[in-house]
Image: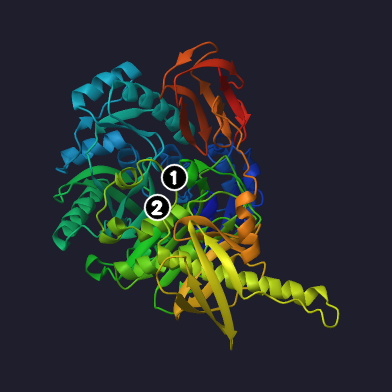
Amino acid sequence: MIKKILIANRGEIACRVIKTARKMDIKTVAVYSDADKNALHVEMADESVYIGASPASQSYLVMDKILAAIESTGADAVHPGYGFLSENKEFANRLEQMGIAFIGPNVRAIEVMGDKITSKELAAKSGVTTVPGHMGLIEDADEAVKISNQVGYPVMIKASAGGGGKGMRIAWNDEEAREGFQSSKNEAANAFGDDRIFIEKFIVEPRHIEIQVLGDKHGNIIYLGERECSIQRRNQKVIEEAPSPFLDEKTRKAMGEESVALAKAVDYDSAGTVEFIVDKDQNFFFLEMNTRLQVEHPVTELITGVDLVEQMIRSADGQELNIKQKDVKLKGWAMESRIYAEDPYRNFLPSIGRLSKYRPPTEGETSSGAIVRNDTGVYEGGEISMYYDPMIAKLCTWGEDRMEAIKAMRKALDTFEIEGVGHNIPFLATVMEHDRFERGALTTAYIADEFPDGFTGADLNPGNARAVASVCALMHQKAETRRANGSGVLAGHARVIARTFMVESGENIYDLTIENTNGTSLVTTTDGSDKAAIELEISHAWVPGQSLVRALIDNKEFNFTVRPIPEGYAVQYRGADFDVKIRSAYAAELVHIMPEKIEPDTSNLLLCPMPGVIVSILVKEGDEVQDGQALAVVEAMKMENTLRAEKKAIIAKINAGAGDNLAVDEIIMEFEA
């Protein structure tokens, strides 16, 4: 049996592998770069080896350093995780030559199926329906434009190696094809060390559904149902679920059997994923095969009870699968929300910095029978680096049915506390509340359709606005009571704590009265309309200083997060970010005469929207640029971002050049006033 596994990866997937290895009583070795010297996976592993500087190209992608770490620690197996060297045939081949077990498929499977062009050719020969496109390599942008016209717009420009949304662009015209080809090529080279590009037809309004396969070295291959991965942004999956709300049993079986047939064509012997594009009539087209563990594998584990990492280890050890196809039963429903360090209010630009607060919801079974799971590689006080993927955690929930899984996810997101970096929890919470998502009416265009102008926060419904206002008033009263009791008073001069307030919750204003009795409070609110006053019975255990508020309102659980601001609290609840101001009647009368802060005018500046490296400046001083014209390309967290002009202007000054590292809001260029 395998005795020691070196994990050639980092972050949450390294931690995930370590958990299963511990369960199997297998020792683990972590590798780490400068940026990861204090990382969670390093702390969790039995041993750790330093492998170089922070950029992945100088550490996690350097094969010789990984192989040297294997030799120095005596590891007899390697788990590559996903990304980095996970689908690198040379890496798998060198491990084989060293007699080290590769916890992944055989070299031929990686070579044939890990390359998107070769895998499509094999799929076509095997009778699998594939998406129309040009499977040959493309040399330059001119050829990309020519082929795009032959295939017919829109087209998908994709890197032949790798995955995870890196090196992928959708082009609707010649200009986008030319620009997308170069960006895809650059991203592919940086992320995978392979800049080969191909082009295929982009199917409008598709679903992205994938089949999990599992094989051993004895010719046994099974499938473990499907995952719906249609909620994507920039070709990066954001929310996944299993099973799909779209497939019927007949289509599921057909996709599964086709996936197994394809896997058998290369003697597949580990966990892998066959990805499909599915149209509105449940016609499915082979997209690619990922010869590795997928980021979203936890949802499959939750509905099947199969530990995929354990099965990969056993397969690499030469053991036969102990699961037959007839044994695979899909139970309940699972959701996964990818929590990223990014600012959803600024077009999801990456965010870096220290996690001053990181408190995920409690894992395990809840009082309602749901299950919460949180796969992560970070901790409170740790750093989110600019060098790697911005994922903070994969928050998963399981329920008896889809609606129960959604409800569990809503509650889990409500109670997830993160401070210090921007994060996408408000966006995830908004999707979970959305009627279209609840109905399962999904396509890969969901985010573009529902948030065409970007994410600006969810609208707070009147009932929730009133509930939050009432709880915040109770919190304010409790804080004032603590201050009064702790400050010391003269005899006969005890401070009187108010019971009535004027509360502003978002755009709503309430006159509010509190009656406290026996651990509960009766809060009465009016909003200036002709409607009758509304009473809410509220109990809570919040104490000043806490950012998570748990309350019962008329015996219904109500959770949200807060941070103190002058006169009240900044609140985050179900995708809405808003301020609650609690004032006395006299203070409320004075609000209208308070001066308003005037924001500085930055309309004549191009500011760096995220911490990153300038890849290229596309204009020069004196140029006249048009609305929408590309001005500069910034790389952050392995993704290239093109910055465009918001209006017609003349470039007055360029303040940065290619290779410069910039912080948020540093000036890249200035325009004539």
Q: Is residue 503 visible?
A: yes
Element under label 1? loop
Can residue 304 be seen from the camera position used here? no
Quadrant of the frame with the C terminus: top right
Q: Is residue 576 left or right of residue 272?
A: right
User: Residue 293 bears which disc, if any?
Assistant: 2
Please give the name of the residue rendered at 33% of the width and 42% of the height, measured from the top-left corner: 448
In front: 423, or 181?
423
Q: Residue, x 39% and y 74% (percent of image)?
A: 370
The residue under the point 39% across, 30% down is 184
Image position, residue 128 (x, y; %): 17, 44
Q: Which dot marks residue 542?
A: none
Quadrant of the rendered structure where residue 118 is?
top left
In the image: residue 311, left or right of residue 624: left
Type of amino acid under label 1: Ser
Residue kind at label 2, given as amino acid type = Leu
Contact? badges 2 and 1 (CB < 8 Å): yes
The image position of residue 368, as x and y in percent, is: 40, 78
Q: Name the residue that disc number 1 marks.
A: 86
- The CA distance from mark 2 to mark 1 is 9 Å
